[in-house]
Image: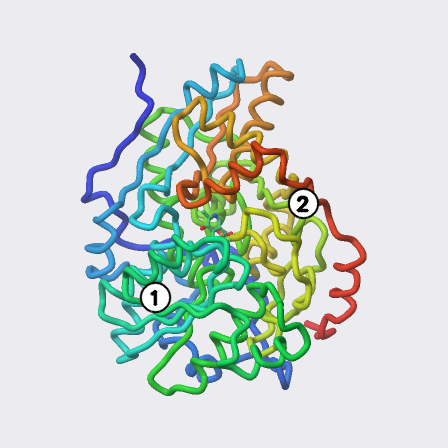
């Protein structure tokens, strides 16, 4: 029998994260002040984040040491396994080798704790008592809640109303860890009240929930805000995925010709891909890299590359990124974690300089692929992860057509155990193949702040 599972011993958890900014000639464009449009200094961000994270945000050091307390917490579920998808290869009858890194073994079932743990740790070190945040599908909220309970920091989560109503078990998980969960829009904040005045039945959006969480953090000097994706320091923390995968690929004797990841804000994609892209940028080894996003919320493939707000109420700094416009409310696809109007500035920059490719699929295609994967490999992917699965299957089928033996690596960023309703709905024929909502995006893009470099 040939090996399907490649495991690293505990002492191989990386001792430093990888920071791709060190290998870029030109780093990502600086964040700018939402009012003055001037580049931000560290002090501007201090009401929201601890100084350690602000420094990581702008660091150009290639290695950033992982604190021992964080490595200790990582030991709970890291290193995560790398699998060879032999059964899927057989089912597809492809000459390609397919590998996947499985982040669903974390306590909350996704890659999110990789950054939740260090974010809580650095806040605790700075004496912060309470963290506010938003959550869409509940993956980020439950991960921050878990990390908060580990380090004794209070967590307050603004959960997108539609998910709050549809996903009571994710809320139950957050509350089990001791977090408080508030459906967003709420009447606790000016941002929430303004939305409710216009639309009392608003289903909410990530952009609105971010506004509420930021507003609450700014109002309380003992509180900070935490973001689960998009920002540079999140990409740094998630690099543990790819650093482990580099070593595990060495164990297999293969090297990926193509790496595939699902992109919402870009963090799990960056996590698996950036350490390999670093090798490419340094001229050590080439690799193709493909970002897969939902057809209903296609920020890289259909958005503008421009400065935009991270939230609906325009309280956050301006980031230069691929965006669909901060007022865009994506159709309610089941991959809730991918329903965000913006994209990581670093992922956006890499696409802009043609280092990575991007593509999109509708949710009928992603669930079809997810079910094929589950039947072959026995793991039911999160609806978000199905985007990486369909991307990898497409590459494997292309290899079959071309008769090439390429090696594919993708990130299976989470399991779908809390998302079974979406699978039930798909199998009952209740899902729609939402495509790109052209006119709504055009409207939202017309409202870009028009900031020049
Ligand atoms: C949050 C989440 C995503 C989307 O966020 P990224 O920052 O793009 O990774 C994707 N998959 C899962 C399982 C998630 O929880």
Residue 42 locus on image (x, y percent): 45, 80
Q: Which mark is residue 288?
A: none
Looking at the picture, tell me which residue is in the foreground, 371 or 391.
371
Looking at the picture, tell me which residue is in the foreground, 253 or 181.
181
Can residue 58 be seen in this snapshot?
Answer: no
Neighbour class for label 2 at 10 Å: few (<14), some, many (≥20)?
many
Q: Taking 22 as reference, is 42 above or below it?
A: below
Can residue 142 be seen in this snapshot?
Answer: yes
The answer to which image quadrant residue 315 occupies is bottom right
User: What colour scheme has been applied to the protein in the rendered image?
Assistant: rainbow
The secondary structure type at the circle numbered 1 is helix
At 47% across and 62% down in the image, what residue appears? 135
At 39% across and 27% down in the image, what residue appears? 378
Q: Which mark is residue 119?
A: 1
Dividing the image into 4 quarters, which one contains the C terminus?
bottom right
The secondary structure type at the circle numbered 2 is loop
Neighbour class for label 1 at 10 Å: few (<14), some, many (≥20)?
many
Position of 398 compared to 229: left or right?
Answer: right
Residue 53 locus on image (x, y percent): 38, 70
At 42% across and 54% down in the image, what residue appears? 139
Name the N-terminal-most of marks 1 and 2. Answer: 1
Looking at the picture, tell me which residue is in the foreground, 448 or 147.
147
Q: How many marks?
A: 2
From the image, tell me which residue sits under label 2: 295
Q: Taking 29 as reference, is 46 above or below it?
A: below
Residue 421 locus on image (x, y percent): 49, 42
Dividing the image into 4 quarters, which one contains the N terminus?
top left
């Amino acid at each position: 029998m040939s090996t399907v599972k490649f495991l690293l011993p505990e002492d191989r958890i990386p001792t430093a994260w990888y920071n791709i900014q060190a290998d870029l000639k030109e780093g990502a464009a600086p964040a700018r002040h939402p009012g003055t449009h001037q580049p931000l200094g560290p002090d501007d961000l201090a009401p929201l984040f601890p100084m350690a994270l602000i420094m990581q945000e702008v660091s150009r050091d290639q290695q950033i040491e992982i604190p021992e307390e964080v490595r200790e917490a990582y030991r709970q579920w890291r290193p995560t396994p790398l699998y060879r998808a032999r059964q899927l290869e057989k089912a597809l009858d492809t000459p390609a080798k397919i590998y996947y890194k499985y982040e669903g073994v974390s306590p909350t079932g996704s890659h999110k704790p990789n950054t939740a743990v260090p974010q809580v740790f650095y806040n605790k070190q700075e004496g912060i008592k309470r963290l506010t945040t938003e959550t869409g599908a509940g993956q980020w909220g439950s991960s921050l809640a878990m990390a908060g309970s580990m380090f004794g920091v209070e967590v307050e989560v603004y959960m997108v109303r539609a998910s709050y109503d549809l996903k009571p078990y994710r809320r139950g998980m957050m509350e089990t860890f001791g977090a408080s969960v508030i459906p967003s829009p709420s009447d606790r904040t000016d941002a929430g009240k303004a939305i409710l005045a216009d639309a009392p039945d608003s289903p909410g959006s990530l952009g609105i929930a971010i506004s509420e969480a930021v507003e609450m953090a700014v109002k309380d000097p003992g509180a900070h805000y935490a973001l689960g994706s998009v920002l540079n320091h999140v990409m740094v923390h998630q690099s543990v995925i790819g650093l482990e995968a580099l070593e595990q690929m060495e164990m297999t004797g293969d090297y990926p010709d193509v790496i595939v990841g699902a992109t919402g804000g870009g963090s799990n994609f960056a996590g698996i891909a950036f350490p390999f892209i670093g090798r490419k940028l340094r001229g050590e080894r080439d690799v193709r890299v493909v970002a897969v996003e939902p057809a209903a919320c296609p920020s890289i493939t259909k958005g503008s590359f421009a400065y935009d707000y991270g939230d609906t109420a325009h309280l956050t700094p301006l980031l230069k990124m691929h965006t669909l416009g901060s007022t865009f409310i994506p159709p309610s696809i089941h991959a809730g974690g991918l329903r965000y109007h913006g994209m990581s500035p670093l992922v956006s920059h890499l696409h802009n300089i043609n280092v990575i490719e991007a593509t999109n699929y509708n949710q009928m295609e992603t669930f079809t692929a997810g079910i094929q994967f589950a039947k072959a490999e026995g793991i039911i992917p999160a609806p978000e992860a199905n985007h990486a699965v369909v991307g990898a299957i497409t590459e494997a089928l292309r290899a079959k057509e071309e008769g090439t033996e390429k090696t594919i690596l993708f990130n299976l960023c989470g399991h779908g155990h809390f998302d079974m309703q979406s699978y039930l709905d798909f199998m009952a024929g209740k899902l729609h193949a939402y495509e790109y909502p052209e006119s709504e995006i055009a409207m939202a893009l017309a409202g870009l702040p028009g900031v020049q470099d």
